């Protein structure tokens, strides 16, 4: 710059100016900021050492050159124009201002500098001086801070910075979003005074303060309050910032965990308790306590609705015992407080002020007396919409729920529904597993458990115990005549009578079918007799079922501990044997177990096993056939009736009725029926193949067989297997089928008719003949019972009834077969009164197949048997 200015002369005014100029130059040269001076041609006339360091150019290569060499390439073309415009107009747009400008160093590196420009006028000359300070580091820090501030403000978390005095010096935008307080409201405040409320845990606040004082980090969960009083749960991360002199700042990061706390804490704890099989009441109590911990201003209760429509308290950890007692057993209803109304309507019910709500009239004083002023109750529903209970929040001031409470209810209702529905399903499974579905009595499994428990108590106390085995008499007849619905009604009635006669501590159970058991602790033989007699009397009381009056009775077997056995299985077996003895003696009585009964029971058990073996191999089982003849046509055969015979290898001939009863008792009646049908069809097919003149065979069916919808198909299949047609088979049924025909029975009978199989009504006149049903059933034949035929010769009523039955058959177009014809007088009367079809010993007893063939081949096959051979 000295080279471009006029030389200075000592002792003159200009010399003094030059001195000043030199002082200015030296001052600028030694400045710590970069200084660049340009002349009126924009040439650099001063470039100090700091400028050399900033740009990386030595001054020798800069002085005298246009200043645009120091300007970044992107703005060089416009640079001279800016300066020249200032010279020409005098308008200061760059002079006297400070701005940050980019600096492009000689090596290509880019820096940032804070630049200010001064305009210097020296005579006619106008110079410009630029002062530049490297602010690259400061600018980077500011940029970092701006980015940090942007991130902090956009963070979902609230951030608070305090000084060492714990007063707030900074809050981010997230703090305002979370708690509502603006920066102006927060600055200078103590955080604890700003966000703590009535239920904030002061112990946690104190722990945070203590850790900050010792320079320790700490994380905690605490209930805070927004500026509008809204409570929320926050996770607080506290980090103290320490300096050389100790604590300088405290940084708090607050995250809203209200929703996650409910899900991750409340839900996790309750589901974990459920997964580990915690009892219902324990889990309900846990749920309510967690609700109250999350929202301390709430008093939570969980009630259930029982099958009678009454409320029951499952959990109410903060309710006074008097309130719990008052609530238990209250019937639900739209005017019964909030919980009763919510349970009755299935809708949430809010009472912001119990004192003025008419729904609380019956119990207002009790609740308000304990400081409960408001209630919000929500129904807990099963998946099908059934109300299982209520989840209620009580408040100690008139108010309604806030957003936190609404969230709690959303989560809580789901958990309560899972809890109560699981309990109902568990109870249902327990009921199915241990109780009889029809009667509600204990089932076999529960009976054994309870009986063993009572026996353990009897052994420990040295007391007797009685076990009663009860079996209804003629129950099968009720099922066969009135149907299973009526039978079920009778079983329920007997079960109720059994429960009514039982004492507290007795065990009443249903073994299955029509068998019941009653266990009587602390009961000897004398007391057991009295108990059994009371029970028999109760059972024999008449009962109306399906429009009919029944007079049930029962057989009772009694076994006594310890005389008859030391465990439940042994006592059950002995009582069962005694009951069977009572039944074989005619029923309607009780019998105590005796040792000799065991032999009879063993014989019955062996007989059952032998019958099973006989059905599998056919050994000992056979069919005999009794002819049905045309009395007026000499030798012509109407058909034969197949009759079961069992020749036991050790016991000899077993009565057919006993065989059928045994099969029914041990569940073999179906197998026995199929064996008889198959054998009868096989034999008839063999006779047809050999030309033996047997037109058809009649087979007896039990009434229960007609409840099997597969019976018609089974009969048709059996006929087809043996090459027979439907008209070759006649199905015989008794009158009991007609007493109260069930839809299933009627459908089976109709299907038989569609298959072309004839139906014969056996033992006609001995039961309660339903003539109305008779004309509607597709019966092609009726059989007059032998009890009428046998009395014809000496009983006028028998003759009159027989004539009437013959007239009924003729009127309905049915064939009539008379059973038990044994004398010529009987034959003559029947023939004269229009009954040509006879069956009985007058003609022949039931015969095995070969004997029947021989009888048919004899010259006079229908010759009466001698009386001594009948």
Image (tube, helix red, strand yellow):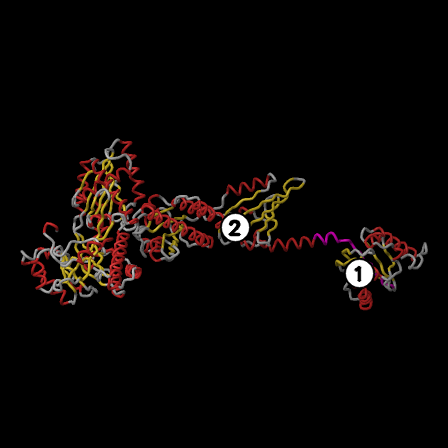
- Residue 868 colored magenta? no
Location of residue 3 in the rendering, given as x and y in whole percent from the top left corner: 92, 58
Which residue reaches farthest bottom?
89
- Residue 140 colored magenta? yes
Q: Is residue 563 above or below residue 683?
A: above
Location of residue 91 in the rendering, given as x and y in whole percent from the top left corner: 78, 66
Q: What residue is at 66 percent from the left and 39 percent from the top?
A: 245
Position of the N terminus, as image quadrant, is bottom right
Side (left or right) of 642 relative to 264: left
Location of residue 570 in the rendering, given as x and y in whole percent from the top left corner: 27, 37
Side (left or right) of 61 relative to 289: right
Location of residue 439 in the rendering, given as x and y in whole percent from the top left corner: 27, 49
The quarter of the picture where residue 280 lies is: top left
The answer for how far apart the CA atoms under marks 2 and 1 are is 52 Å
| Residue annotated with mark 2 | 257
Q: Nearer the viewer, residue 412 or 480?
A: 480
Q: Residues within 10 Å of mark 2 (few under 14, many from 20)?
A: some
| Magenta stretch in the rendered image | 125-141
Give SS at disc 1. Answer: loop
Side (left or right) of 692 relative to 70: left
| Residue annotated with mark 1 | 72
Q: Nearer the viewer, residue 508 or 671?
A: 671
Q: Is residue 14 visible?
A: yes
Q: Nearer the viewer, residue 708 or 381?
A: 708
Q: Residues within 10 Å of mark 1 (few under 14, many from 20)?
A: some
């Amino acid at each position: 710059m000295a080279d471009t200015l006029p030389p200075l002369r000592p002792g003159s005014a200009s010399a003094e100016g030059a001195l000043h100029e030199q002082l200015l130059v030296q001052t600028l040269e030694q400045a710590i900021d970069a200084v660049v001076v340009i002349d009126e041609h924009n040439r650099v006339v001063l470039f100090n050492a700091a400028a050399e360091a900033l740009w990386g150019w030595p001054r020798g290569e800069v002085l005298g050159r246009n200043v645009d060499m120091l300007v970044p390439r992107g703005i060089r073309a416009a640079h001279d124009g800016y300066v020249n415009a200032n010279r020409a107009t005098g308008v200061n747009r760059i002079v006297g201002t400070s701005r940050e400008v980019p600096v492009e160093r000689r090596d290509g590196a880019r820096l940032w500098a804070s630049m200010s420009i001064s305009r210097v006028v020296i005579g006619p000359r106008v110079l410009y001086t630029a002062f530049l300070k490297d602010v690259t580091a400061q600018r980077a820090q500011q940029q970092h801070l701006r980015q940090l501030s942007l991130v902090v403000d956009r963070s979902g978390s609230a951030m608070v910075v305090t000084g060492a005095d714990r007063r707030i010096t900074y809050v981010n935008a997230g703090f305002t979003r979370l708690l509502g307080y603006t920066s102006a409201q927060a600055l200078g405040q103590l955080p604890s005074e700003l966000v703590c409320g009535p239920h904030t845990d002061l112990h946690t606040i104190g722990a945070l303060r203590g850790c900050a004082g010792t320079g320790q980090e700490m994380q905690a969960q605490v209930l805070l309050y927004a500026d509008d009083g809204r409570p929320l749960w926050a996770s607080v991360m506290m980090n103290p910032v320490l300096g050389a002199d100790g604590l300088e700042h405290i940084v708090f990061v607050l995250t809203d965990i209200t929703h996650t706390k409910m899900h991750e804490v409340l839900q996790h704890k309750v589901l974990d308790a459920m997964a580990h099989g915690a009892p219902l009441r324990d889990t309900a109590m846990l749920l309510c306590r967690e609700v109250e911990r999350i929202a301390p201003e709430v008093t939570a209760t969980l009630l259930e609705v029982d099958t009678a429509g009454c409320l029951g308290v499952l959990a109410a950890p903060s309710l006074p015992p008097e309130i719990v007692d008052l609530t238990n057993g209250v019937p639900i209803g739209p005017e019964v407080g909030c919980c009763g109304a919510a349970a009755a309507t299935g809708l949430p019910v809010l009472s912001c002020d119990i004192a003025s709500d008419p729904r609380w009239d019956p119990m207002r004083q009790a609740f308000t007396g304990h400081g409960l002023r408001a209630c919000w109750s929500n129904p807990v529903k099963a998946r099908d919409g059934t109300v299982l209970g209520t989840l209620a929040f009580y408040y100690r001031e008139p108010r309604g729920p806030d957003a936190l409470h609404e969230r709690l209810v959303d989560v809580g209702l789901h958990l309560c529904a899972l809890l109560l529905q699981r309990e109902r399903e568990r109870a249902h499974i327990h009921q199915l597993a241990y109780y009889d579905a029809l009667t509600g009595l204990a089932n076999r499994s529960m009976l054994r458990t309870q009986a063993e428990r009572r026996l353990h108590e009897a052994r420990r106390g040295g007391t007797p115990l009685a076990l009663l085995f009860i079996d209804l008499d003629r129950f099968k007849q009720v099922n066969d005549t009135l149907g299973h619905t009526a039978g079920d009604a009778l079983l329920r009635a007997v079960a109720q009578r059994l429960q009514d006669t039982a004492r507290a501590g007795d065990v009443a159970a249903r073994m299955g079918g029509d068998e019941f058991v009653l266990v009587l602790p602390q009961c000897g033989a004398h007391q057991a007799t009295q108990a059994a007699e009371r029970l028999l009397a109760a059972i024999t009381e008449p009962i109306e079922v399906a429009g009919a009056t029944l007079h049930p009775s029962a057989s009772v077997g009694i076994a006594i501990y310890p005389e008859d056995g030391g465990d439940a299985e042994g006592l059950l077996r002995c009582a069962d044997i005694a009951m069977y003895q009572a039944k074989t003696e005619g029923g309607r009585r009780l019998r105590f177990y005796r040792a000799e009964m065991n032999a009879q029971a063993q014989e019955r058990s062996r007989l059952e096993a032998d019958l099973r073996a006989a059905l599998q191999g056919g050994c000992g089982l056979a069919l005999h056939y009794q002819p049905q003849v045309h009395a007026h046509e000499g030798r012509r055969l109407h058909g034969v009736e197949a009759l079961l015979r069992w020749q036991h290898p050790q016991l000899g001939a077993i009565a057919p009725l006993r065989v059928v009863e045994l099969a029914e008792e041990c569940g073999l009646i179906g197998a026995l029926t199929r064996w008889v049908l198959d054998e009868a069809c096989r034999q008839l097919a063999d006779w047809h193949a050999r030309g033996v003149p047997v037109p058809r065979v009649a087979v007896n069916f039990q009434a229960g067989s007609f409840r099997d919808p597969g019976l018609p198909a089974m009969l048709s299949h059996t006929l087809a297997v043996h090459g027979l047609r439907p008209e070759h088979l006649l199905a015989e049924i008794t009158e009991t089928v007609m007493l109260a025909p069930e839809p299933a029975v009627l459908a089976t009978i109709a299907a038989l008719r569609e298959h072309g199989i004839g139906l014969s009504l056996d033992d006609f006149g001995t039961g309660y003949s339903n003539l109305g049903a008779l004309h509607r059933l597709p019966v092609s034949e009726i059989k007059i019972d032998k009890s009428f035929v046998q009395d014809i010769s000496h009983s006028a009523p028998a003759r009159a009834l027989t004539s009437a039955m013959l007239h009924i058959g003729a009127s309905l177009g049915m064939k009539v077969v008379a059973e038990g014809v044994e004398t010529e007088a009987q034959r003559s009367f029947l023939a004269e009164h229009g009954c040509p079809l006879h069956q009985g010993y007058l003609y022949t007893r039931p015969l095995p197949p070969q004997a029947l063939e021989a009888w048919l081949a004899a010259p006079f096959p229908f010759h009466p048997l001698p009386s001594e051979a009948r």
